[in-house]
Amino acid sequence: MHIYLDYNATTPVDREVLEAMLPYFAENFGNASSIHSCGQRGRSAVDEARVSVAALIGARPAEIVFTSGGTEADNLALLGSLAASNQSRKHIITTAIEHHAVLNAAQALEQQGVDVTYISVGSDGVVDPQDIRRALRPETILISVMHANNELGTIQPIEKIGRIAAEAGVYFHCDAVQSAGKLPLNVDSLGVNLLSISAHKIYGPKGVGALYVRTGTSIEPQFHGGHHERDRRPGTENVPGVVGFGKAAELAEMNRDSDAAGIEILRDRLEQTLTIALPAVRVNGSSSRRVANTANLAFAGAGGEALVIALDLQGISCSTGAACSSGAVEPSHVLLAMGLSPDEARSSLRFSLGRGTTSDEIDRAIAIIPPTVERLRALSPRASNTVHAR
Amino acid sequence: MPNQLVQLEPFCESADTRRSAQSMVAEAPAVADQSKHCADTGNVASVAVAMSGGVDSSTVAAMLNSSGQQIIGLTMQLWNQRRLPQLPGAEPTQHRCCSIDDVYDARRVAEHLRIPFYVVNFEREFENNVVRPFVDDYLEGRTPIPCTLCNNHVKFDQLLLTARQIGAERIATGHYARVRRNCESGRYELLRAVDESKDQSYFLFGLTQEQLARTDFPLGELSKGEVRDIARRLQVPVAEKPESQEICFVPAGNYVRFIEGYLHEQGRTLPEEPGDIVTTAGEVLGQHYGLHRYTVGQRKGLGISEGRPMYVVALDRAKNRLVVGEDRELRSTACEVREVNWIPYPVPDGEVRAKVRIRNRHEPADAEITTVGPTDARIVFDEPQRAVTPGQAAVFYSGERVLGGGWIR
């Protein structure tokens, strides 16, 4: 049986979630914007889900804007809040370890003339709030910092940054896609104006996410269309997806602590066994300030890409840096930002566990990974890139 | 010693490989009959197939798969098509190497065959070992062969290494050439493809014994038509795909624009200073616009009118001069080669007689090769050869065997 250790990439849809969604494909298929009773059934399902998703993050239902996923939520947060500002000079602050949904949206803003400051992180993969404070300018409009990093699992000091943003009167966006379901989330204690979450990271369906928009925070819609989602995101509601998201949020809130406790024990066993069984294995990022399910390990002298393939051929799914369009990998910008060399970054793997991970799977992974790493190391005559003399 | 080595040595089995290839076309898709080689038989470890998305490598994957061989499909991501977007014809979806379409095709074939398939990223290795030397060669007045550099330093080096790291012991490619182990010498030999018109042995002269020992060329005994037939019979999804002939990373075959774009991207300045076009006697005939725009043997686009056909005879980098001359001045009786790789034997001590091919479609010419030191050699042709071009490879043949080759100085 395959051992899936890539829950940060995506999670399987929970049975209960799937069952909650099924009636909304062919039976209750109505358009939630329609007047008739068929549409009304869709509307009430969406409203119910909105309550559940709001509850997951301590928000009011009216503050939830459903989107097509985390990427759209991040784009709407950055592009939408900048578009809503009529300042002549605009500046935003973000970090070098954000997901590409934020980083590339920030780069798009730079193309439009917005100044962007990218704050780096320490070798622990955690941003220093004082660096954020120092980057503030009179024309700063937005700070965007992720909660849990997708590659390392490291938890960023969102509450502290939230206070800095509030003092400065600057909007604060948090990409919480990787922390939802893993950490308690409360938009008030985090001090955010905007917060992105995604269903498929919490055992819900792909293609649905949400942006929390605090009452009073103004954003411009980035699509043109109807009056859906209180004029913030046009498009016919993805009723089955939203229903699934609502159920997944409910289950996440219910199972969060018990999930985390069991997963942390397994993650720690995997990590400790590998670091003892193999020489020159290092944990990337803080091992204390991180979510319970993620282990990012550098296997010096073994190429991460070949290692992912070699492990996949033996039934273990894990991952390395961010995937590019053709499916090949580039060295992780997160690891580079932490100060790892390109070779160290290329030799790093992420294992992310989840609700379905069993003790037996971890035992088998522990049996398979060390000899695989040893074989790769034995076949790597040089760790660094070689240029052949001509 | 060298003279006797020029003779064909006996092989352990003199099976008529041509016939076996044909019988395969006619009957079953049972291929990869390793038994006709004398070594590495009975090894059931998996083979990595380098899949480009084209018909040849796709057919290799289909052939090996249908013969029951355990295979893993690997596609190399070599060049980011989004780089140098200003180049004409640089749209990333075009059917060129590493285009998204080609990776998609390779993946489609792998899905059809239900084999494990991965895209592996060698962009860095490709740039360091192929693209940059390609550009530098042109700037230094040479005419490079990027395919050979890729074979030597990426495909049969990094890719083979990755293949071994993920548990495959061998690599199979869609090249038209053959590898055979000589039982007497114990060495692996490189042979021309049976289909002369498709033979790619010229591009493979640099393969070492270690590389050849782990390489399979399943198409070496087949004609292109036979390969298409097999592809159709095995329902390979790309069976009807047209062939590409261009240098994979150069859009629209415009290497001058590529070099200029690449140098610009690298923040390097283009040595585009114009210089004199001179005859071999030193008479100035006109101006050139940067030596990287010209290649030895070129006749068109020189912008000179002499009343007689004039050809580029040499690129004089030191004096930034383009030397032109008549056809007879283009002919040389000798040249020197560097980084010589000998295949059926280690460096020979004396002269070797061979047929030497100085560019891909060149009719091999009789010559005598004398080694100069451990890595260089001097080639003296029986008859003067036209447009012996620095940067191209001189590859030595004896019958169907490739004796070796080197880079023309």
Image: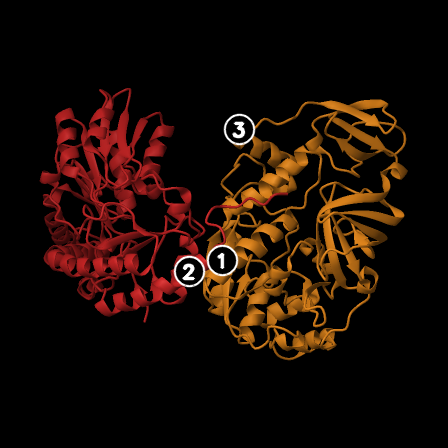
Label 3 sits on what residue type? Gly
Label 2 sits on what residue type? Ile
Residue denoted by label 2: A309
Q: How far apart are marks 3 and 1 (CA)?
A: 32 Å
Residue denoted by label 3: B267
Q: How far apart are marks 1 and 2 (CA)?
A: 9 Å
- Circles 1 and 2: CB distance less than 8 Å? yes
Q: Which chain is red in the rendering?
A: A
Q: Does the image show residue A54?
A: yes
Image colour assigned to chain B: orange
The location of residue A11, given as percent across then percent down, is: 26, 59
Most foreground residue, B150 or B39: B39
Taking the spot 31% from the left edge, 36% from the top edge, the residue there is A96
The location of residue A342, given as percent across then percent down, is: 41, 43
Q: In which quarter of the image is the N terminus of chain B?
A: bottom right
Residue denoted by label 1: B162
Q: Is mark 2 on a helix, strand or loop?
A: helix
Q: Please, is residue B280 above or below residue A13 in the view?
A: above
- The chain identifier of the residue carrying mark 2 reads A
Q: Quadrant of the C terminus of chain B?
A: top right
Asked where in the image residue A176 lies, by quadrant, the reply is top left
Q: Residues within 10 Å of mark 3 (few under 14, many from 20)?
A: few
Q: Is mark 1 on a helix, strand or loop?
A: helix
